[in-house]
Image (tube, coloured by chain):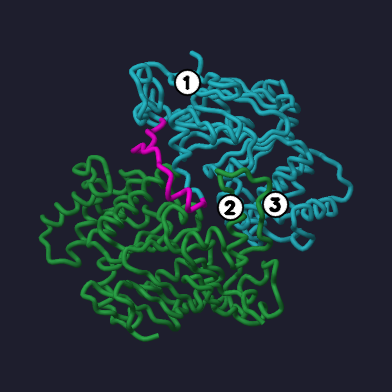
């Protein structure tokens, strides 16, 4: 693939492979993963614990520390200026210019994302002054407006609060305010509501949707919760064992999934609106990614497994309409 | 089915250090009953007191006041041999098997300890426990392993087996699958259902995941700030939620169905639950309730039947 992408595309990740070299062996955290994000789109990356989804998205802006290493791949990103850059090959100073500015993150645990020695306002002001030539007075005024945007009650008081003085939901709102402070083109939210109660979760998801529209951002949401996916995303990537298993638009994924893992996963989640006599369970456990052999990572648990699945990586099968499935069962002949 | 567990006006207050009068009112006057072979689901947000209530019901915590009956007997007056017998019949499974299983005991030790403690003759304990392990999809090879050598799902199976070893009649399941992946969760839930079918055990199933509670429970109680505000058959609570908090809670659940999720309208209630130290006067939900009236600010609504088998604590409903 060349360095060009359609004008409305923000991010194109190609063949990204990340490994961790540990004493226990080589962890194949992410293998040949890919991802496209277009302007104003909400994308969900779904997978269970240890499937590599967090590592994958961290690798997009080079947030991989030793013993981890990005082995190969390209991460094309269209900057605000319109220039397309490969984030993996950028010098660190330039990546820092983009991170927190054009691409920002919301991590799962707001308590560890905030520095306990800084107030809510400090976090936002620092993010603004780091990337823009703004006086700290103006930045404070912006911070106040941002806290208002994320619907924090009494923002004038809360801006001076330290993280421990805020509830979990409020902390996550402060993290979100910090993340959107520079109006990023792409907001990556890694399990942004996992530690929160359902009622607070609903408020935060509504907020993310509104902010996405208001600031015309693209949203990449990482989650294991299929309900959250259905509520938020337009397109979905399903990840398993460090690889993309299937991708399609949200309706296709939920109504006619083609990968056996996606099919089983959807039947394993109790839908509160339906009467379910018996949930289906997937035998076995999620794979250990240490020293992975070639072959489909889902093969050991797949009810439809064939011989070839155990020895060769599944090919990418294009079913049209951007529905891609990595499975030998769909290969004809 | 006859009733097995009855909880009457149970309260559990925790004193706040450094204050004579302040207390965390974790459970603040709760009434419900569980039948034999029934699963009673308990839902609510973190801090609403559902886990405390689960511990109080099997007397892991002594309630501040109120009564608990098990099979007609007053649990709080049990002593000595009788209390020990109650401990055999009422068990608990905790959320996180990493902290509920002793890391220095093998699976055999973990599962045989209850047998020895209660002098249950099983002949060949090893063979007996292997049989138990096999019934939940584990095997002989796991007998002398330590908890850290098992996966999360396997550990939780061991924790459930330990609760089942003494053939209890009642188990409190406190978020038993919250630490597990969805693909593993389904297997554990199905296993719990199968066991219940075979042995006619009653469950108190506590979870914040309403989809899971619905799947498991016959009846569901909704808890808010230490009180049960509504109880109904599990289908009924979804068809016809009456308490504004229940409506709010149900409309917040993310539903794995994009067509539904993208068209429904949420009941918008802002804010978060207040602290259980400063419980609002009157109805404890009134400061957040869009339908609150003057009466709600003054008097606390009792839990009264709005329709048969469907009590609600709300002044808008119920025959007052």
Which residue in the rendered view is the most extreme toward the top?
A: B320
Q: CA distance from mark 2 to mark 1?
A: 33 Å
Provide residue B242's location: percent of width, then percent of height.
Answer: 49, 28
* Subunit that carries the residue with mark 1: B
Query: What residue sits right under mark 1 in the picture?
Result: B317
> Label 2 is found on which chain of the structure?
A
> Dot 3, crowdedness within 10 Å: few (<14), some or many (≥20)?
many
Distance CA(mark 2)–CA(mark 3): 23 Å
Q: Residues within 10 Å of mark 1 (few under 14, many from 20)?
A: some
Q: Quadrant of the N terminus of chain A?
A: bottom left
* Pointer 3 chain: B
Residue B158 is labelled as 3
Q: Secondary structure at mark 2?
A: loop
Left or right of residue A325, residue A179 in this image:
left
Q: Quadrant of residue B52?
A: top right
Q: Residue at x 58, y 54 (%)?
A: B180
Q: Which residue is mark 2?
A: A269
Q: Which chain is cyan?
A: B
Q: Are marks 2 and 1 in contact (CB under 8 Å)?
A: no
Examine the rendering and report whether any part of residue B293 can be seen.
yes
Q: Where in the figure is residue A179, as x and y percent of width and height?
A: 29, 59
User: Does residue A327 appear left or right of residue B13 in this picture?
Assistant: right
Q: Secondary structure at mark 1?
A: loop
Among the chains pictured, the one given green colouring is A
> Which sits in the foreground, A320 or B69?
A320
Q: Main secondary structure of the magenta part?
A: loop
Image coords of residue B37 (percent x, y): 73, 34
Q: Residue at x 67, y 67 (%)?
A: A301
**Stretch in magenta:** B256-276
Quarter holding residue A266: bottom right
Q: Residues within 10 Å of mark 2 (few under 14, many from 20)?
A: many
Q: Counting residues from the N terminus, which is met first, the one under dot 1 or under dot 3? A: 3
């Amino acid at each position: 693939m060349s360095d060009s992408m359609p004008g409305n595309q923000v991010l194109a990740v190609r063949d990204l492979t990340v490994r961790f070299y540990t004493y226990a062996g080589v962890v194949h955290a992410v293998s040949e993963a890919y991802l496209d994000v277009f302007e104003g789109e909400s994308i969900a990356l779904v997978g269970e614990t240890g499937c590599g989804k967090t590592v994958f998205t961290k690798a997009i802006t080079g947030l991989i520390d030793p013993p981890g290493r990005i082995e190969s791949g390209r991460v094309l990103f269209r900057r605000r200026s319109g220039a397309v850059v490969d984030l993996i090959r950028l010098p660190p100073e330039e990546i820092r210019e983009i991170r927190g500015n054009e691409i920002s993150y919301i991590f799962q645990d707001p308590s560890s994302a905030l520095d306990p020695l800084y107030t809510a306002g400090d976090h936002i002001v620092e993010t603004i002054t780091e990337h823009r030539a703004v006086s700290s007075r103006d930045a404070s005024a912006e911070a106040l407006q941002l806290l208002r945007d994320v619907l924090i009650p009494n923002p004038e008081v809360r801006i001076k609060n330290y993280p421990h003085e805020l509830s979990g939901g409020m902390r996550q709102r402060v993290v979100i305010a910090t993340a959107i402070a520079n109006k990023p083109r792409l907001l990556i939210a890694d399990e942004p509501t996992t530690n929160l109660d359902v009622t607070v979760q609903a408020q935060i998801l509504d907020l993310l949707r509104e902010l996405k529209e208001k600031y015309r951002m693209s949203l990449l949401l990482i989650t294991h919760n299929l309900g959250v996916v259905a509520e938020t995303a337009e397109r979905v990537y399903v990840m398993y064992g460090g690889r993309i298993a299937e991708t399609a638009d949200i309706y296709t994924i939920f109504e006619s999934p083609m990968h056996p893992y996606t099919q089983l996963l959807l039947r394993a989640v109790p839908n509160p609106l339906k009467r379910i006599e018996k949930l289906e369970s997937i035998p076995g456990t999620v794979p250990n990614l240490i020293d992975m052999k070639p072959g489909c990572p889902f093969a050991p648990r797949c009810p439809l497994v064939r011989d070839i699945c155990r020895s060769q990586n599944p090919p990418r099968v294009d079913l049209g309409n951007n529905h891609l499935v990595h499975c030998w069962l769909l290969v004809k002949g | 089915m006859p009733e097995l567990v009855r909880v009457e006006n149970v309260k559990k207050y925790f004193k706040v250090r450094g204050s004579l009068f302040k207390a965390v009112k974790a459970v603040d006057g709760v009434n419900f009953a569980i039948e034999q072979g029934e699963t009673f689901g308990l839902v609510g947000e973190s801090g609403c007191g559902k886990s405390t209530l689960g511990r109080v019901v099997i007397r892991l915590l002594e309630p501040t006041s109120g009564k608990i009956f098990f099979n007609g007997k007053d649990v709080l007056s049990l002593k000595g041999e009788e209390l020990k017998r109650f401990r055999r019949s009422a068990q608990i499974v905790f959320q996180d098997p990493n902290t509920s299983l002793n890391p220095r005991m093998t699976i055999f030790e973990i599962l045989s300890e209850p047998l020895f403690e209660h002098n249950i003759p099983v002949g060949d304990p090893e063979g007996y426990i292997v049989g138990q392990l096999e019934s939940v999809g584990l095997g002989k090879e796991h007998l002398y392993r330590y908890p850290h050598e098992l996966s999360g799902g396997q550990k939780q199976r061991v924790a459930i087996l330990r609760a089942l070893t003494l053939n209890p009649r009642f188990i409190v399941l406190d978020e038993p699958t919250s630490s597990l992946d969805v693909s593993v969760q389904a297997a554990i839930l199905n296993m719990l259902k199968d066991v219940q079918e075979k042995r006619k055990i009653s469950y108190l199933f506590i979870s914040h995941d309403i989809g899971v509670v619905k799947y498991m429970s016959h009846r569901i109680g909704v808890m808010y700030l230490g009180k049960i505000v509504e109880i109904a058959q599990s289908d009924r609570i979804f068809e016809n939620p009456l308490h504004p908090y229940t409506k709010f809670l149900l409309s917040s659940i993310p539903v794995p169905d994009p067509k539904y999720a993208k068209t429904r309208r949420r009941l918008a209630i802002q804010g978060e639950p207040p602290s259980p130290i400063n419980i609002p006067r009157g109805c404890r939900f009134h400061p957040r309730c869009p339908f609150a009236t003057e009466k709600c600010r003054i008097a606390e609504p009792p839990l009264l039947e709005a329709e048969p088998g469907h009590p609600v604590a709300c002044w808008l409903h119920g025959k007052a």
